[in-house]
Image: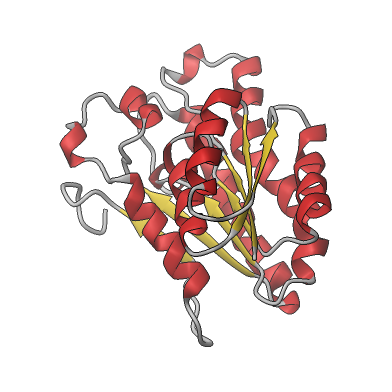
Amino acid sequence: MIALVTGASRGIGKTIALELADIGYDLAIVGRDSSTLEETSVLATAKGVKVLKIEADLTQTPSYSMIVEKTVEHFGGLDVLVNCAGIPQKGSFTEVSPEEWDRIFAVNAKAPFFICKAALEPLKKSTKPIIINICSVVGFKGYIHQSAYASSKHALAGFTKVLAKEVQPFGIRVHLISPGGVATEMVKKMRPDIDPNDLIAPEEIGEIVRFIVTKKGKGTIDQFYIRRFGGLAFD
């Protein structure tokens, strides 16, 4: 089985990649930083799976089809696609430039959209095709100083809901995972007001991905909303 994971060089993406390696998935891992991508590759390879490293800048449109093409060319197919790459924004909406807006939307919304499009044909050939888009609590809520980031995650959530319906006839399952604060460098920068001890561990998101890809039967879960235990229930 083959999995393609974007944003795999650190944080949630790295954890998901290693979780998939743990259950035997060969990996195509995507990131911008070659050194941190290599760290993920070494850890995954030690688990006995094959790893293809793909350095890519997801602000650049040609990279969307390129990473899928390289994956399929190298492994001969694709079974699981995890869109996890994301970039943050912090500051009033009055401080957001058109350039920053475009950069945030390119990585957080445009890249998953067109990577899913590029991956459709190889996924249709899989015996158990799955798409997992990593969203955020801000895809449903509003927090000050995260206007552009929240907008991009709202876009990703909306796309994922439509995508699930459009690819259902092909047997492709689509899942949206929307965590609250996770203990990554990105979240710590965006929400320094949260005690690091109260943040969700990246491994908890990895465990949910493991559940998704190993679950059998007819039942499926469209969306996972994971709040911090210290946060407000059902808020």
Q: Is residue 48 left or right of residue 90?
A: right
Across and down, in percent, residue 191 comes to 30, 28
Across the whole image, how many numbered discs are drawn on residues? 0
Across and down, in percent, residue 145 comes to 39, 24
The residue located at (54%, 35%) in the rendering is 86
The residue located at (53%, 16%) in the rendering is 96
Q: Is residue 166 left or right of residue 230?
A: right
* Of the pair 152 and 21, the residue shown nearer to us: 21
Rendered position, 72 above or below 56: below
* Of the pair 170 and 151, the residue shown nearer to us: 170
* Of the pair 22 and 11, the residue shown nearer to us: 22
The residue located at (69%, 27%) in the rendering is 57
Task: Residue 1: name its quadrant.
Answer: bottom right
* Residue at the farthest bottom position: 218
Across and down, in percent, residue 195 comes to 17, 32
Q: Do we see residue 33 in this rendering? A: no
